[in-house]
């Protein structure tokens, strides 16, 4: 199912009239047909639930007006909807897509300005070191002298806790009770750079700018243009 209600709407054919009715075979009475009909009803019910979730998400994000949206559904179901011409529909959708894009860009610009102010202030804190890329780190604990350091292509075993600026934990190997293992050339840029500053046994805290993390294309649990904070313990360099 598409996550965006706008994408769902735009995927539908633009038509001012009713769709051609489907020609269905006459109903059978076998047990298999009855079971299929029951399955169809169950899946249809689930689709209704998912559509409601899509509507809620779109309304909560400010994309749509709930009252007008439900009025359109109600009028369409009743056969009383006033449907604009195909050209007018295209014009309205195109204009609204432009408005959404402008609104999202303004929000992104605001987040980036806020991020820059936060990083500038955080970089002044005692013990915080800022690299040329903008990555910030703090040494919380040093491991034994001579501990192995990873390269950009090493596979490492680590424990970590990832939080957002407000302290929300979005990922934690410690909460799962099992260290994570991964190659450094397969993670976000802030990790690839930051882990190479560590040696086995070290514990660092990384404050990673959004452009060294997920940028505008972050998972929903994180959100776009987020500064990420990781407390990382490098347990072992595996190769």
Image (spheres, rainbow, N blue to C red):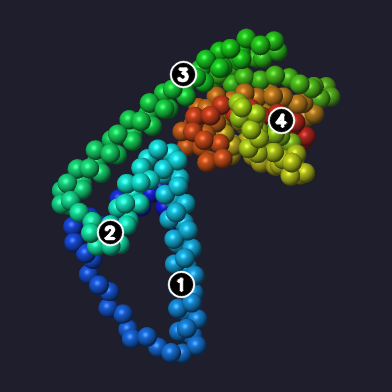
Q: Which of the 4 image quarters holds residue 66? A: top left
- The CA distance from mark 2 to mark 3 is 44 Å
Q: Is residue 193 visible?
A: no
Looking at marks 4 and 3 on the same chain, the residue that comes earlier in the sequence is marked by 3
Q: Between label 4 and label 3, give the one nearer the viewer.
A: 3
The residue singled out by tag 2 in the image is 76
Mark number displayed over residue 232: 4
Q: Quadrant of residue 139?
A: top right
**For discs 4 and 2, the disc positioned in front in the rendered view:** 2
Residue 12 picture quarter: bottom left
Viewer-nearest residue: 174 or 151: 174
Tell me if mark 3 has few (under 14), some (14-19) or many (20+) residues whose alpha carbon lies within 10 angstroms of its own.
Answer: few
Q: Are marks 4 and 2 in contact (CB under 8 Å)?
A: no
Q: Earlier in the sequence, mark 3 or mark 1?
A: 1
> Between marks 4 and 3, how big is the CA–CA gap?
27 Å
Q: Earlier in the sequence, mark 2 or mark 1?
A: 1
């Amino acid at each position: 199912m598409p996550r965006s209600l706008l994408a769902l709407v735009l995927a539908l054919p633009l038509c001012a009239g009713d769709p051609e009715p489907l020609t269905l075979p006459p109903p059978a009475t076998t047990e298999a047909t009855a079971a299929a009909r029951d399955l169809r009803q169950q899946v249809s019910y689930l689709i209704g639930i998912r559509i409601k979730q899509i509507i809620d998400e779109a309304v909560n994000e400010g994309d749509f007006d709930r009252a007008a949206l439900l009025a359109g559904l109600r009028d369409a179901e009743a056969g009383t909807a006033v449907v604009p011409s195909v050209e007018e529909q295209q014009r309205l959708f195109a204009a609204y897509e432009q408005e959404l894009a402008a609104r999202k860009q303004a929000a992104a610009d605001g987040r980036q300005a806020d991020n820059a102010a936060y990083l500038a202030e955080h970089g002044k804190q005692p013990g915080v070191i800022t690299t040329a890329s903008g990555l910030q780190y703090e040494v919380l604990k040093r491991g034994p002298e001579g501990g192995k350091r990873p390269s950009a292509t090493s596979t490492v075993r680590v424990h970590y806790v990832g939080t957002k600026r407000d302290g929300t934990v979005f990922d934690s190997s410690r909460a799962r009770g099992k260290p994570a293992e991964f190659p450094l050339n397969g993670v976000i840029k802030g990790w690839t750079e930051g882990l190479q500053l560590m040696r086995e046994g070290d514990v660092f805290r990384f404050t990673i700018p959004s452009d060294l993390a997920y940028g505008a294309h972050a998972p929903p649990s994180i959100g776009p243009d987020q500064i990420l904070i990781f407390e990382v313990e490098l347990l072992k360099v595996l190769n």
